[in-house]
Image: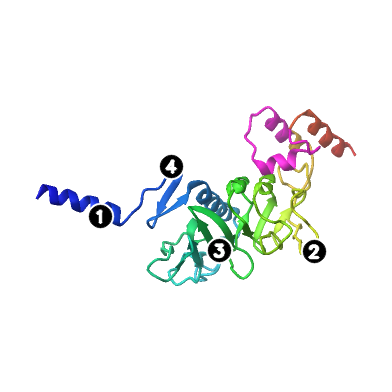
Amino acid sequence: MKKTFIFILILGSTSFSQDCNFGFTEINDLCFHDGDIGVLQKLIDNSVNSGVGDDCDPYDSYCGSPNPYMDQLDAWFWVVVDSVYYQSGTNNGFQNGDGDVDPLELGLQEWENGRLISLMCGAYIYCQLSGPIPEEIGNLSEISVLRLEYNYLGGFVPETICDLNTNNSDYLEFDLTGNQLCPPYPECIGMDGFWSQDTSFCSEIGDINFDSIINILDIIVLISFILEENYYDYQELTISDMNFDGNLDVLDVIEIVNIILS
């Protein structure tokens, strides 16, 4: 009896799950790269924290950021893993209807060998993303299609987006059009033709506390960054780097002082 019981345990463990390599997480008996999942989660977290959709009608299943409908069991979204379609509303879909959008519920995705190679979360998909694009976007080293057009993404586009393997001149492979993203934009992004952004929500470089005025308060915040009294993220670095040299120092303070005195 003891030998039979052990055999059943071993058979069960190999039949219903697979061992994932280090750096990969098992979800629904499939392996997904931790870094790729982390970027998707960051897009979700930034959307939730942005405040966009906070005034939504609680009875509107489409109102929110990210779009809460993506979590519903009857949602039409799908994920392709190694050429196999996992459709929501079926037994093998990733939607769980728990009220929160999870990484594998976000838009239309394609994975190969555990790595994300395509994310379509733009027009006609209604992901309703908001907040900044995470600096970790560059971790999607295997992605060849990134479509985030016509969401509510704001702030500055991180330079790490230039590390991707996307063809940024082909809008079918790479598209950030129709968001609220602010200049300056990374040099790898072509702004000819289809590129357009609503910059009415953007702050001027030097307005470090985002109060629409450049004054002594911005200098105080900048000095706290230089002295490392306060941590600053990519968004704060970009709006504080007055001379665009990638560093925060006394030269940036001088630039702000000149603006105030002028």
Mark 3 vs 1: CB contact within 8 A: no
Q: Can you tell which mark lies on residue 47? A: none
Q: Is residue 156 visible?
A: yes
**Where's residue 186, x and y in %?**
74, 48
Comparing labels 1 and 2, the label whose residue is closer to the camera: 1
Q: Earlier in the sequence, mark 4 or mark 3?
A: 4
Circle 4 residue? 22
Up the image or down, 161 lies above or below 223; here it is below
Closer to the camera, 223 or 152?
Answer: 152
Is label 4 in a helix, a strand or a loop? loop
Closer to the camera, 8 or 126?
Answer: 8
**How many marks do you count on the picture?**
4
Comparing labels 3 and 1, the label whose residue is closer to the camera: 1
Work out how far the residue at label 4 is from the one at label 3, CA to CA, in angstroms: 35 Å
Circle 2 residue? 193
Comparing labels 3 and 2, the label whose residue is closer to the camera: 2
**Region of the chain picked out in magenta, as a range:** 220-247
Work out how far the residue at label 3 is from the one at label 1, CA to CA, in angstroms: 41 Å
Circle 1 residue? 12
Work out how far the residue at label 2 is from the one at label 4, CA to CA, in angstroms: 43 Å
Residue at 72% across / 34% down in the picture?
222
* Amino acid type of the residue tagged 1 in the rendering: Gly
Residue at 45% across / 47% down in the picture?
24
Magenta-span inclusion, residue 191: no
